[in-house]
Image (cartoon, helix red, strand yellow):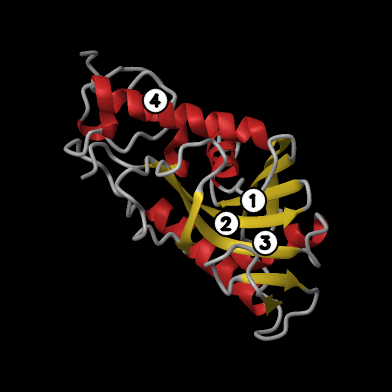
Amino acid sequence: MRKLRLLTASKASLGLTGCTHWLNLDAWWDEGGSAKSRIGQDAHTEIELLIEGMQDAKEPIIAGVGPNLYTAIESPSRGGEPDSGSWSSAAKSFLRDYGFLGASIDTEVSFAYGRDDSGAGGVCIGRNRDYSLIAPEDTIAGTVDVQIRESGLLTLLDWKTGDGTRALPQLLTLGGLASGGYEASDLARLLSVEVRKGPGEKPYRVAIDQTTTIGKCREYLQSLHNRIQEAAVNGTRKVKGPHCYQLFCPHMRVCHGVDE
């Protein structure tokens, strides 16, 4: 029986604030469904279809996932070129400009952490944000939009339709979740890419492009896990602060933020 709410990587920033009240299962939680969230979902779906259509399927590099690993090629094998000014056109422009066409790309892979908190990375639980295989002891989960796994280097990319400059906590968490099979001294390249569409707009902007070690990603993931475990033992607490609105806390609309 789960004691506290599962923390997803997209809300990782909340995990290291002083407030843990939102972890309560009985705390009201805005599940989304806003116009902005629907735009984001549409963009991710469109880009996923692009990557499937422009690549040749290969065997997945993670056991139990896929087939969802592709080798990107310059000319789509089916479906033709994406429409100019579309989310998928923006994504392809980025992949081409940054030299990822030709790389082995794995998309929409989901991970969880908690059942094995040894610090060696998360457990792969499937794809496409299907969290049905989450275990009761898991505390953190997340889905990687794009990952490229090479010897000594894990590259992770998260597509954004809004501001991507605050995505580093999410990327560090995903880096820890996806780090299975790597050494702590190996490198993780973390990218947050804003995709845009519309006449006259640059199709994408790289909001974050940071390289760190796998060990740093795992430390961040473990710190989140430890904070949740502490709240499970000692109870949660409300703390009012700018994080309530800056981090878009889903509990904000009904939380008075009174420190208890």
Callouts 3 and 4 close, C-beta under 8 Å: no
Callout 4: 10 Å neighbours few (<14), some, many (20+)? some
Q: Amino acid at mark 4?
A: Arg
Report helix, strand or loop for mark 4.
Answer: helix
Q: Is residue 21 left or right of residue 197?
A: left
Please tell me which of labels 3 and 4 falls first in the chain. Answer: 3
Mark 1 or 3, closer to the camera: 1
Q: Is residue 38 left or right of residue 51?
A: left
Residue where numbered disc 1 is placed:
157
State the residue in front, 222 or 244. 222
Residue 227 shows which numbered tag? 4
Q: Which picture quadrant has residue 166?
A: top right
Residues under labels 4 and 2: Cα distance? Answer: 26 Å
The image shows residue 137 at horizontal and vertical percentages of 33, 43
Please tell me which of labels 4 and 1 falls first in the chain. Answer: 1
Please tell me which of labels 1 and 3 falls first in the chain. Answer: 3
Residue 145 shows which numbered tag? 2
Q: Amino acid at mark 2?
A: Asp
